[in-house]
Image: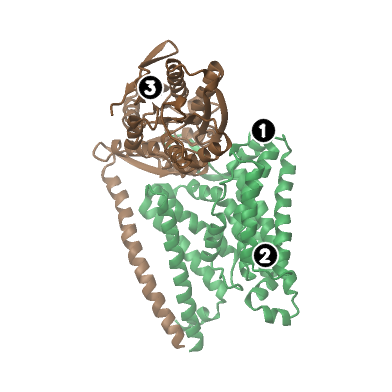
Chain colours: A brown, B green
Amino acid sequence: MGKNVKKAFICAILSLVLLSGCGIGYGEEKEEPVTEAENEDLIVVGFSQVGAESDWRKANTESMVKTFTRDKGYELILEDAQQKQQNQITAIRTFIQREVDYIVLAPVTEDGWDTVLTEAKDAGIPVIIVDRMVNVSDPELFKCWVGSDFELEGRKACEWLRAYCESKEIAPEEVNIVDIQGTAGASSQIGRTKGLKDAVRANGWNLLEEAAGEYTQAKGREATSRLLRKYDNINVVYCENDNEAFGAIEAIEAAGRRVGNNIAAGQIMVMSFDGVSDQAIDYAKSGKISCIGECNPLHGPRVEKIIQNLQQGVTPDKYEYVDEDIFSGDSTVTSIEVDDEVYTIKILGK
Amino acid sequence: MSKISNKFKDMTDTNLLLTITVVVFFLMYIGAIVFQGKGFLKPQTFFNILNTNAALIILSCGMSLVMITGGIDISVGGVTALVSMCCAVYLDFKGGNVAVSMLIAILIGLAYGVVQGFLVAYLDIQPFIVSLAGMFFARGMTTIVNTNPFNVANEKFVALKETRIIVPGMGTVNKLGKYVDAYVEIGVIVALIIVILMFCLLRWTKLGRSFYAVGGNKQSALMLGINVKKTKFLSHILCSLLAGIGGYVYFLHVGSGAVTHAQGAEMNAIASSIIGGTMLTGGVGNIIGTFFGVLSLSTIQNIVASAGLDQAWWTGITIAAMLCIFLVVQSVVMARKKRAIKK
């Protein structure tokens, strides 16, 4: 009997603590629909983001959050899918259920979107795709796409490597590359890998192995250190984003090798993409990363422009490519030519 | 008044916990309608919860069964991933037959049940340890079968996946003034059938009652002439079989194979069972409660998602809080009941 009273007492206190905690939490949630009712003309945007795996992704999310603010007349609902397509599909269904005005989707992979995008179309909600592409049977399922030309990024970076090797008189068969790939099936991975493979074939370089890096520092380090043990002649590590490059640099230094442009002297060249974080730019300045193909994450204002156009009844371009630079701390190569177009290399000063 | 308190005393623990779950679920849903507005008033919102969680309902049924028998099985999520991957590889790479893929799912489930059930019941190894090993094995095997995630393109399978059962009279008119039918997927029908079958099994059959007896008190069950080992064995076979079926329903919903599929599904199944009034100590539980447990869990997730709390961990935190509240409410009510009886 005494035991039960004690138990009930403890339980009551526990539940009070919990309920009060929840009360505060739910109080905040409750405010939202009220303000929503007050501002009937807010444009509600549902944004399904892939996750927060890399600096690029974080900068991308931040750009969206900073653009779609209440002050500008938007309400942004952000859903982090933690790298899972299933979570994104659920998120889009939630957006449809909430009757948002626009759905912005940064898809994790290219395939498997037909069903849920048809549901969005049936509900009359325009879908804007950012960053990676979707592969759907009916192109009308999304309004437009905005993002980077990943294959061009890859080709630009490879063209830089070719021009660099040529001016330093390094024979193509002495170039031994390993490719640390991004998330398998993502447009950026497909494009950047294709850019490299085409260049390898055209130039006669050696591509020793392609390893999965999943766009993370940890995987980049793991893959690079494994490859360094397996091959002793690697002189170029082609990382498909900055975070993988950070990992690769750690692995190379831990293996007692040096990173840098001077391949002939036994240094290992690290190439990378994105160029988003300060650390990446610093590494490029100091020569730890030889060349970075920029991938601009600031899609917020671009998406806002599209939404403004749609609001006024203007149909935007179906595909909008973002202009991007290529960075290097080394001034050997000053400009490259891809598809008859000349790109100036942005040389970063020390 | 005295009548009500008499009823309170007369209720079995199982029914009392069930009542709490059902009441809390309805309160929560009404709360969602009041605070979140129009979205939750649409029948399709509720059907979407069912569509997304059909597999979890099936997994939780199996989980409740082993928990009632006094065991636990944390391999169900792994089995789900393994089933999805095997069926996906079979259908996509080998151009297989849909019916055979279902058979594969059931066979994987059965094989798991026989091995784990044998180890638990006849070799007397802790069910937690056995199924922990089972979970690691399943996740490992999934990676060996195929590492990269991919979508299945097999036409017959996609047709089955896209099959929608229209719920008459529940559709809504969308923004453009077009009428959109409400629908459920095939998996939901399967899940509902399994809930009903499991409910009947546990309530009205001799085998069903012996699960409760073994979970409640092994010694007494033995004295009553119940074959305790066989009952435990059967509970694991049923649970893993349901994991196989649940795995296929999951596969039918997502239409892809991936190593990360159904991550943490075993924990969600345990949470749903507990919310539904099944006790980890065994002997107490109800399948209808489990069903409402899954609904409560996923409604909370849905509320968190549509409240626009951007960070993914919010879902986890709310579920944790909800689980705590349920456990506290359960033990308070049970304690009060015990006191009422003593008086």
> What chain does mark 1 sit on?
B
Viewer-nearest residue: A29 or B85: B85
Q: Which residue is mark 1?
A: B155
Amino acid, disc 1 = Glu
The quarter in which the N terminus of chain B is drawn is bottom left
> What chain does mark 3 sit on?
A
Q: Which mark is residue B200?
A: 2
Most extreme residue toward the front is A265
Secondary structure found at label 2? helix
Residue A313 place in picture, x, y as percent: 34, 24
Residue A128 place in picture, x, y as percent: 41, 30
Which dot, 2 or 3, sits closer to the camera? 3
The residue at the point 29 percent across, 35 percent down is: A67
Mark 3 Cα within 10 Å, few/some/many (few <14, many 20+)?
A: few
Q: Is residue A222 left or right of residue A73?
A: right
Compute the Cα span from label 1 to label 2. Answer: 37 Å
